[in-house]
Amino acid sequence: QVQLVESGGGLVQAGGSLRLSCAVSGIIFRPYAMGWYRQAPGKQRELVAGVTSSSLTTYADSVKGRFTISRDNAKNTVYLEMNSLKSEDTAVYFCNRNPPISFWGQGTQVTVSS
């Protein structure tokens, strides 16, 4: 049974920080690239950060320099450290493989108040 369990979201003021976690089970983790995605109200889901199996990282221009993705292959977990948060970062955040599989977890809500 595939499980993608995101956690760590919440309400934060602009300029603040959050650290998201995603526990992955039921699928092979180590050899695959992973990503953090987000979906804001009325918008399509977008990839904001990716990490390869060897921990090479890529970022969307909108989060570059503020977000850091990492993974712990021993724990089958992916993290997203988010700093200098802006109101436009408000969204539900999801993790998945990159490119994603068809299954998605419930995500974790991040709300940034200005």
Image (cartoon, rainbow, N blue to C red):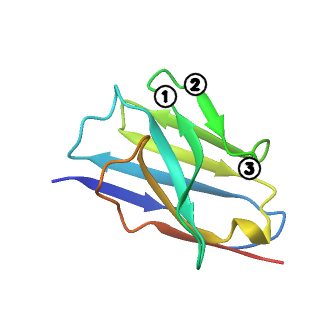
Rendered residue at 60%/44% (across/down)? 49
Q: Are marks 2 and 1 in contact (CB under 8 Å)?
A: yes
Disc 1 target residue = 52
Residue 35 rendering spot, x and y as whole percentages: 49, 44
Rendered residue at 60%/31% (across/down)? 57
Q: Viewer-proximal residue, 72 or 40?
A: 40
Q: Is residue 48 above or below residue 41?
A: above
Residue 65 rendering spot, x and y as whole percentages: 79, 42
Disc 2 target residue = 56
Mark 2 is on which residue type?
Leu
Rendered residue at 65%/48% (across/down)? 81
Q: Viewer-proximal residue, 79 or 107?
A: 107
Where, by quadrant of the figure, is residue 31 drawn?
top left
Q: Is residue 14 left or right of residue 43?
A: right
* Quadrant occupied by the N terminus: bottom left
Q: Can residue 105 be seen at all in this image of the molecule? A: yes
Mark 3 is on which residue type?
Val
Disc 3 target residue = 63
Alpha carbon separation for disc pair 1 and 3: 18 Å
